[in-house]
Amino acid sequence: MPPMSKRNTPTDKLAALADCMSRIANERDKAAFAELFDHYAPQIRAYSLARDPGSDLVADDLVQEVMTRVWLKASKYNARLANLNTWIFTLARNCRIDYLRRNSRYATEIDPTDIFNDMEDEGPGPFRLAQQDRTGDSIKAGLEALPREQSDILRKVYLEGKTHQQTSEELKLPLGTVKSRVRLALKKLEVLVVR
Amino acid sequence: MDKANNHPYDELLAAYAAGSLPLSQALCVSAHLEHCVACGQKLQNLNRVGSQLMQQLKPAAASQQLKQRLLDSLDDLTDAASQREASKVDPAVPRCLRQFIDHNYDDLPWKRVSADIHSVELCRDSNGAKVELLKIKPGGSATTHTHLGDEYTVILEGSFSDEAGLYRQGDFMVKTAADRHTPVATKDRVCICLAVTEGPIQFTGFISRLLNPFIRRSYA
């Protein structure tokens, strides 16, 4: 019997997914695209449903937008400069901002494309690479160790897309308490220490 | 790069990374990031927090029809973004502001606010916040003022000082309704700022207080 596949660790999985990106970039490989879809589409739908529970059509639209950008921007993705999971998150975030702006009751003339496109088109730049691997696992462990009241607020802000004001209204907490919990959580995650 | 001494506070940068910041405030953060490597590094970590939170969600299965529809569409896709014309805007203008500026700061329809200040409104946010550029002449002073809401400011060109200190290119400030301040541009050059105000500015000097009803009206 062959030894157990090493493809089971998150790092190997990520490497396999990054390989799909280069196959799309170099060979327009649709099988590689399908593999990325199988991995990321359920995550992207979950992200959309966290903000709009029950809105399956909105969730499908977001998957379509994000995966379309994956296909078009694969050649700009550089695995040495940006973690693929993080890159996908920023795409999903950017597409959601764009969707909300287009479908908002209150119109604004501000086009978010040029505000948030740093990761999409250029990656984070080489100076940010060195600390990536150090912070990846520590963020994961840190999130698991956070007190519930702090991780709940991070989820409201990041996943449900709530402003601090909306979070304060929903949780019936003073605005200052919301802000200080976000600050405390980020401090514990050690994501604000720049070396 | 890295001239800025005043940065967005951490929870504001996190809200930017999360995409939950009003776009007008996001414009200010984005303009600051062009001048600040340190905040760029923080942002990268804050994006990773979002990525981890997204991965912790219970996956919501996608249908085969959606997958097939996407696969069928791939051959017809073209990247509109890559076909955009190369920007003709002065590279000194932050990228996030080029959507409002055709060439450079000089060509904008500046309006006189006082002997020392000109302003030009760029747009409004969906929450009603006003996004504008302010130009203070060398050595010029912005009359002492307070705000009804928060005011976000990023220095794009030049520098100014107020009661709290000196602010230079890239510096990011938030003044709340309780703050009164009197910014004065340094004497050597014009100071241009991006300013986002959530409510009308209130001038507090005796004469300029008479202006307030007119200023409030422009927010109607």
Image: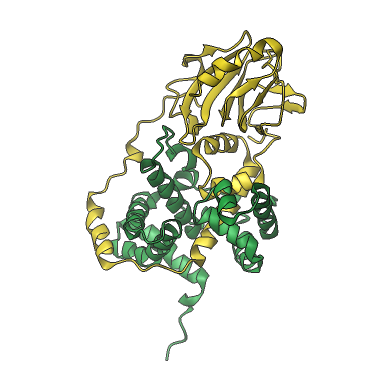
Chain drawn in yellow: B
With A148 as the anchor, is A114 left or right in this view? left
Whole-percent x, y for residue B210 in the image: 63, 12
Q: Quadrant of residue A58?
A: bottom left
Chain drawn in green: A
Numbered-mark total: 0
With A138 as the anchor, is A5 left or right in this view? left
Whole-percent x, y for residue A62 in the image: 36, 54
Q: Is residue B179 above or below residue B210?
A: below
Q: Is residue B74 above or below residue A5?
A: above
Whether residue A30 is visible here, answered yes or no, is yes
Q: Residue at x 51, y 35 (%)?
A: B24
User: Which of the two residues, B105 or A4, is positioned nearer the viewer here?
Assistant: B105
User: Which of the two residues, B37 or B7, is positioned nearer the viewer here?
Assistant: B7
User: Which of the two residues, B219 or A7, is positioned nearer the viewer here?
Assistant: B219
Q: Quadrant of the N terminus of chain A?
A: bottom left
Whether residue B48 is visible here, answered yes or no, is no
Whole-percent x, y for residue B219 in the image: 51, 24
Whole-percent x, y for residue B22 in the image: 51, 40
Q: Residue at x 28, y 45 (%)?
A: B78
Q: Quadrant of residue B38?
A: top right
